[in-house]
Amino acid sequence: MKSRTIIFRILSYIGAAYVIFSCCALAAFIISNGLPTLKSELFFADTPPLDAIFGLRPVWDGIWPAMAGTLCLVVLTMLMATVPAIGCGIYLARFAHGRIKSMLSLAIDMIAGVPSIVMGLFGFVLILLLRRTVAPDATTCIAVAALCLAILVLPAITVTTRSSIESLPEVLELTGASLGFSENQILRHLLLPAAARGIFGGIILGAGRAAEDTAVIMLTGVVVNSGLPAGLAGKFEALPFLIYYTAAQYMDESELMRGFGASLVLLILSALLAGAAGICRKSMERRWKGLK
């Protein structure tokens, strides 16, 4: 029995070391290649920065249009996903019971397990369906990409909302009931404000997933050179697809280095979002443990 415990402990150490080494090696590779490229030329090439930011002049050899497209895509995705996901999380935590709760939880788990490429195919088929029914001119665009990404990130926000509410101390609900609050008043004035930081952490994690995904947007509207997003029905650029395309189609070393620079920018963005989510969760835990 003791020998089995030792073997399991050794395997766990090896697994942990493997994960840590892989993450550190990948980060070091991207940083070492991308850090020298972090200059104004990486973002705007030879276009004046203010002209590029306000769309007065196009940027052909910089990553600014892809950054702007990624930002617009993430904002649109979160606008579509946040309210339904939080509502579903609240329903599961407070109102759902029995078989309905089990079935809805299973549905959320199934959506969470759907590969992103399948979600991209769903968006593409949705466009074909719209063409044959109510919208003959429907085509790939940022709105469809955001819709598919919203479905993809919905489970993460839902689960985070549910766990944030369910992990709150029972004394909050008892206090509200003793003050004569109704169920809705307890939820609105006590539970949601208390769980807000945890819910916000889930939203940030969802935004990070939306910013990083490539498979979905490949089939729903992303292109290489479209400039700044022109509207909900327009094509767009995004950092993940720019990195993928550059790795597959680069013609010289300068294009390859631009791809490394875009990878580092996306890595920094993802790290910032993940760090913000961690801070929100720890802040919530410390608050309810009485630590400030």
Image (tube, rainbow, N blue to C red):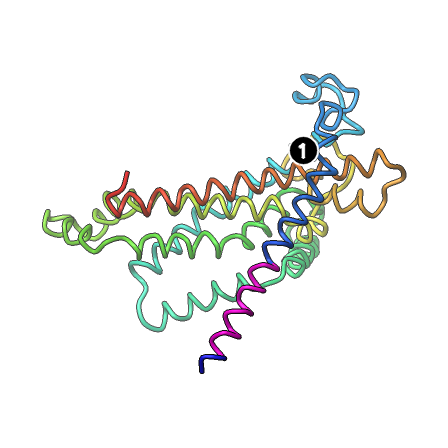
Instruction: Pick the quarter of the image with the N terminus.
Output: bottom left
State the residue in front, 277 or 220: 277
Residue at 89%, 39% in the rendered image: 251
Q: Residue at x 30, y 56 (%)?
A: 167
According to the image, label 1 marks what residue? 229
Q: Secondary structure at mark 1?
A: loop
Query: Which quadrant of the figure contains the C terminus?
Result: top left
Residue 267 as seen in the image, left or right of residue 289 = right
Q: Is residue 109 above or below residue 123?
A: below
User: What residue is at 76 percent from the left and 26 percent from the top?
Assistant: 59
The spot of residue 236 in percent (x, y) is 70, 38
User: Please, what is the three-letter code of the amino acid marked with disc 1?
Assistant: Pro
The spot of residue 140 in percent (x, y) is: 70, 47
Q: Determine whether, in the image, residue 6 is placed left or right of residue 219.
A: left
Question: Which span is picked out in magenta?
Answer: 4-18
- For disc 1, the neighbor class at 10 Å (few under 14, some 14 to 19, many from 20) is many
Q: Is residue 271 magenta?
A: no
Q: Main secondary structure of the magenta part?
A: helix
Q: Position of residue 68 (x, y in %)?
A: 64, 32
The magenta stretch spans residue 5: yes
What residue appears at the point 63 percent right and 38 percent down from the top-left corner?
Answer: 70
